[in-house]
Image (cartoon, rainbow, N blue to C red):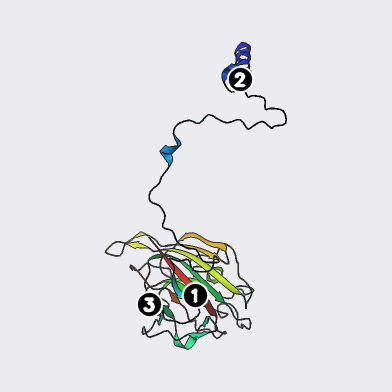
């Protein structure tokens, strides 16, 4: 055994093994030892398809060139009232959209399946109320009917406002508590960046793949590929209802607190 160890040591140290390093010329540092490459690196290179070139926004909040802009501050051309599909009547002023609670929920004219969504919202600095009656609104990631039918990502003042955890801002309402509370103060703009993967159904409405959602709140991961149990329900357990594509809906919640505002809303359709 002793002899074997000795022989190995001699072999490793020997220039004959082929790994001996040349002494660098005076004044130069030795290059790091390189391992001899094995096999052909080209075997693992993939050249097709080439990703489509798009132009990103000037900032990460600005719409990239392949986005559908849903609200750029100027008008509500992309939106209708949920109840009768007439033009949306919320208030647009100074580049900002403010909820008009008496006119009800609004939704996009277009329908979507899988997408990336960017949306900014602001609780007014003079907000009053508490619990669920303080700046309540919401984004329905798929609006599957009138009223509050669909899958709600909650909007609420959660800066300093106690409520049930699965009903605070950035919750998937009554289904998933956000990983952290990343809320900003009333009066400050906040952002949601959402990746929505729609549920898949068979012809008879059986779910073959549930909906999944990832949400960043003010750049912080708060929902990590959460698998939904079905549509949002105020009372009772969530249930799935077959749909293919659906509008995105914003909630005019009936509480008495001051209305919230939105800006810079865009979506990118995904395969
Ligand atoms: Mg809500």
Instruction: Report helix, strand or loop for mark 2.
Output: helix
Decide: marks 2, 1 in contact (CB < 8 A)?
no
Instruction: Report helix, strand or loop for mark 3.
Output: loop
Mark 3, ligand 1, within 8 Å: the answer is: no
Mark 1, ligand 1, within 8 Å: the answer is: yes
Instruction: Report helix, strand or loop for mark 1.
Output: strand
Q: Which label's residue is closer to the chain start, 2 or 3? A: 2
Location of the N terminus (image quadrant): top right
Residue 47 seen in this snapshot: yes
The disc placed on residue 138 is: 1
Q: Which residue matches tag 2?
A: 12
Residue 204 placement: quadrant: bottom left
Left or right: 94 with respect to 110? right
Q: Which residue matches tag 3?
A: 109
Mark 2, ligand 1, within 8 Å: the answer is: no
Q: CA distance from mark 3 to mark 1?
A: 18 Å
Instruction: Say which residue appears at 63% left-offset and 15% top-offset.
Output: 10
Q: How many marks?
A: 3
Q: Position of residue 135 (x, y in %)?
A: 56, 79
Q: Position of residue 241 (x, y in %)?
A: 35, 69
Instruction: Say which residue appears at 42% left-offset and 73% top-offset.
Output: 248
Q: Decide: few, some or many residues near mark 3? Use Cα within 10 Å; few <14, some 14-19, many ≥20.
A: many
Left or right: 104 with respect to 133? left
Vertical arrangement, residue 26 with respect to residue 16, above or below: below
Query: Which mark's residue is nearer the viewer, 3 or 1?
Result: 3
Left or right: 31 with respect to 223? right
Viewer-nearest residue: 235 or 47: 47
Location of the C terminus (image quadrant): bottom left
Query: Which mark's residue is nearer the viewer, 2 or 1?
Result: 2
Q: Decide: few, some or many residues near mark 2? Use Cα within 10 Å; few <14, some 14-19, many ≥20.
A: few
Q: Decide: few, some or many residues near mark 1? Use Cα within 10 Å; few <14, some 14-19, many ≥20.
A: many
Residue 260 placement: quadrant: bottom right
């Amino acid at each position: 055994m002793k002899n074997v160890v000795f022989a190995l040591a001699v072999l490793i140290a020997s220039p004959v093994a082929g790994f001996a390093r040349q002494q660098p010329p005076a004044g130069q540092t030795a290059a790091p030892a390189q391992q001899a490459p094995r096999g052909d690196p080209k075997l693992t290179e993939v050249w097709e398809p080439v990703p489509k070139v798009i132009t990103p926004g000037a900032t990460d909040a600005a719409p990239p060139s392949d986005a559908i802009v849903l609200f750029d501050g100027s008008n509500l051309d992309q939106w209708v009232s949920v109840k009768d599909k007439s033009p949306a009547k919320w208030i647009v002023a100074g580049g900002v959209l403010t909820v008009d609670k008496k006119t009800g929920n609004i939704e996009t004219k277009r329908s979507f399946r899988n997408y990336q969504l960017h949306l900014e919202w602001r609780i007014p600095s003079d907000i009053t109320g508490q619990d669920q009656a303080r700046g309540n609104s919401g984004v329905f990631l798929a609006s599957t009917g009138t009223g509050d039918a669909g899958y709600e990502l909650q909007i609420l003042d959660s800066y300093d406002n106690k409520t049930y955890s699965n009903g605070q801002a950035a919750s998937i309402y009554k289904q998933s508590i956000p990983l952290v509370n990343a809320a900003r103060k009333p009066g400050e703009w906040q952002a949601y960046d959402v990746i929505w993967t729609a549920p898949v159904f068979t012809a008879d409405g059986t779910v073959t793949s549930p909906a999944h959602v990832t949400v960043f709140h003010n750049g912080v991961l708060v929902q990590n590929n959460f698998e939904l149990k079905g549509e949002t329900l105020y009372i009772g357990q969530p249930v799935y209802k077959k749909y293919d594509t659906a509008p995105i809906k914003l909630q005019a919640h009936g509480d008495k607190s001051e209305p919230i505002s939105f800006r810079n809303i865009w979506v990118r359709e995904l395969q």
